[in-house]
Each structure stands twice: as C-alpha cells, then as structure tokens.
Image (cartoon, rainbow, N blue to C red):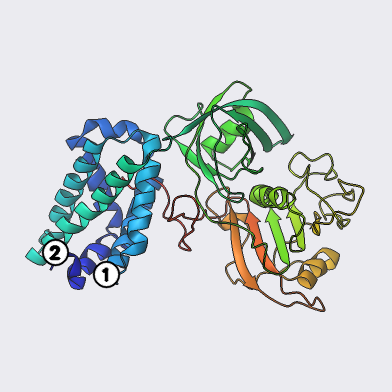
Amino acid sequence: MGLEDRDALRVLRDAFAPAEGRNDLVRRFYTNWFALDASVRDLFPPEMDSQRAAFAHALHWVYGELVEQRAEEPVAFLAQLGRDHRKYGVLPTQYDTLRRALYQTLRGYLGQESRRAWTDTVERAADQSLKLITGVMSGAADAEQGPAWWNGTVVEHARVSRDLAVVRLRLDQPLDYHPGQYVNVHVPQCPRRWRYLSPAIPADPDGRIEFHVRVVPGGLVSNAIVNETRPGDRWRLSSPHGGFHVDRDGGDVLMVAGSTGLAPLRALILDLSRFADNPRVHLFSELAIPASSTTCPCCGRLPHTIRGSPSRRSRSTPRPVLGRRLPRRIAAARPACASDRAVGRDGHQVRRLGRPADPDLRGPEHGARDQGRSHRQRRTAGTHSARPAVAVGWRRAAPHRGTGRAATQSRRSGRNGQLG
C-alpha cells in the first residue's frame, strides 16, 4: 500500500504532532543525522530549538496532507524548499543521509516497547514517503538554473531611532521579485543564521534593495543589523517567497501597518505609482517616530493624495510628499490604529474605511518574523460605500509560505525554514 495506506501515514503524522515526545523524536533524528554525516552540522546554527520545532511542524503538515491524499501542495512546498536550500550549500548526498537517518529514527522511536507502532505497513509508508520527500527536494534543487543566492554590499545604514534602522544594499546582480514578497537574509555578524525580511522598494534593475529592521528583544540577528551593520558589509539573500499583492482590478484597498510591517506595503504602493489607473488605496501605519512622512526614511517617497491625521505617538501632522493631486488615486497617512481597540479620530478613520474581518488579527507580539500579512476579506464599514480589500502589515508577523516559484502563496504559515 505505502503512500495509499492512510492508517500507516496517520501513524507517521502523529509521530510529529505537537504533543509530548515530539521533541525527543526530532532530537534523536538530528543526533543520528549528525553522527551519520558530520558535514551537515555546519549547515545549522549552534542553537537548534527553533530548527527542531520548524522541522517537526513541516513534517506534521506534509504527512497530514498525504493522509488526506492531497499531494499537489506538499510536492510544490517540498520543491520550493529544495530550491531554497541551495543557499545553504546542501549536497545531493546529504539528502540521502537525511532520509536514512530519519528512517532509522522513526523505526527506533515507533518500535519502542511502549509504542509497538512500527509494523510492516508503517515501514513501507515510511520508506516510500521519505523517498518522496527527499527525492522532490533534491530533484527540484538539481533542476533549478537560477542563482542559489544573491550577494550584496551595504551602501547605507540609517538609524531611524534607537531600535529601528533602514539598510540599503547594492546587489552584485539584480534580484527579480514581486512587491510584497520577502527574502531570507544572512548577515556576516551572525554566521549560519538566516532571517526573513521584506524589501521596502520594488525590484530594481540596478540591484538596489532596501530593508527596514527593528530590534527584536533577545534577537541576535535584528540586534546585529540595527547596531552593528556598517557600509561595506556583505549580505547574502535567498530567492523570493510569497504572493502578497494588490489586485489592481479589484475595489478600494485599505492598508494597515504596524512598525516595520510597513515595508512590504510601501513596496506595493511604490509599484502602484507606476500605473495611471489604480484602485483607491488608504495606508495607515504605526511608527513611534515624531517626524513627518517627508523626513521619515521608512515613509519617504510614498505618493500622497490626502493629509493623514496625526498619530497618537506623534505631535506633528504628516504633510503630503507631493504638492499636487495624483491621478493614481493613492492615499497615504500615518495614524497609529490597527486593532479593534482603536478609539478616537484614528480609530474612526480605520473603521470608516473598512477594517479586516479577521478574528486572528493581533499585534506584533503574537508574530514570528518581520513580515506583512495579507487579508483579502472585504467589508462595508460605516457610511463608506466601497468594499475595500484589506492588507495588513505587522512587525514580526508570521511569513507567508510560497508554494510556487516566488509567485504563489500557501495560506498555511509557519512551514518555512530548513526542513533538514
């Protein structure tokens, strides 16, 4: 039966379930893998807790999809992982040792006296599924013709505030990405540690790219970027991921950004400004910076058609960047209001223009990475007759998982990272 045996696949899925014993299984796997192939240890950072959690989460989802006999999305996800893993320098032989180590670990774990779950049918399902997982990843990596990574040089590092920096780079070769996508970034101060960042400008044919980074308490990489990055530093970027975008043929769009969640929305607006006909866009962002949008590096260059109401954290009123009304019907403002608890004039503006009907919309403290989240729900609010699509960006919100080659986006977040 193998991959058609749902009961056997369910046993494998449950082995990686978020319950007691999962960490023991994954810990055993990495111990076995590093013993079998010492070269793979150099692919990972010293601390492995987050890596083990991401690995278990990814395999639990993959096996869950196989239980439901849905192979298309897992295969696309694994292929994207294989292409993306090229930036780590993964060798074809290391996929083989991964498969062997995981097979041995599952056999020992499920065959324990207390479990006795390792049967002939489970063994066949494990053998075939692990060959599928590693085969898809290795095959996609071998078939990819594009660069494994992009190198770039930091040309400017601007400290916007004590814990916020704007970093501009010049890449050795242009990186083609869609506005709203994100990339995995490696900085020299933190070897073998990668972090997801959203470009704050559209793709540039000359290789220029810009990131906004805020210090995450206890975060090694964010602290290094904000406090230690200097012009001349060499960064490494992965291929782009995600499908966060604005439908130019749709209705009005309301954008709400928290902190550096403004970056992907900024890139989207700058890209929209290239066109003469666009949906009406309102942008509300929360930045604890007492400056107008003409002096804030995070907000600069955004086209305005309206004056924004002042943020509760700012004593100044944003001024239009451009003194004329643009035909593009793009509006940008900076009130600090992005939650259901928003009150006063700022809260009224967001509610009037339409806010996301999403019960999971939470602040940055609930997130995981420096990314924006897209909510395509449409809603009529107050007396506003339009039904705006809502795009929300939060600092450290969970990144979108791209299941295609940088153009599609899975709605299941949290599966990105190293599988092995």
Reading the image, the residue beneath label 1 is: 67
Who comes first in sequence, dot 1 or dot 2?
A: 1
Residue 365 is at least partly visible in this image: yes
Q: Secondary structure at mark 1?
A: helix
Q: Position of residue 229 (x, y in %)?
A: 60, 27
Quarter location, residue 244: bottom right
Q: Which percent across, then down, holds residue 420? A: 31, 45
- Closest to the observer, 4 or 53: 4
Label 1 sits on what residue type? Val
Q: Which mark is residue 122?
A: 2
* Viewer-side label of 1, 2: 1
Farthest residue toward the left?
A: 120
Q: Is residue 299 left or right of residue 345?
A: left
Q: Is 308 situated above or below 228?
A: below
74 relative to 351, above or below: above
- Local secondary structure at mark 2: helix
Query: Tag 1: Cα neighbours inside 10 Å, few (<14), some, or many (≥20)?
Result: many
- In the image, residue 233 sits, relative to residue 305, either above or below, namely above
x, y (%) of residue 317? 90, 51
Q: At x 45% / y 62%, what residue is drawn?
A: 412
The 10 Å Cα crowd at callout 2, few under 14, some 14 to 19, many 20 or more, is many
Give the left or right position of residue 61, taking residue 262 as reference: left
Q: Residue at x 78, y 47 (%)?
A: 302
- Residue 144, given in percent of the width and then of the height, sits at 37, 41
Q: Nearer the viewer, residue 121 or 222?
A: 121
- Inter-mark Cα distance, 1 to 2: 13 Å
Looking at the image, which is closer to me, 3 or 53?
A: 3
Residue 18 visible to the viewer: no
Amino acid bearing label 2: Val
**For this rendering, which residue is in front, 250 or 18?**
250
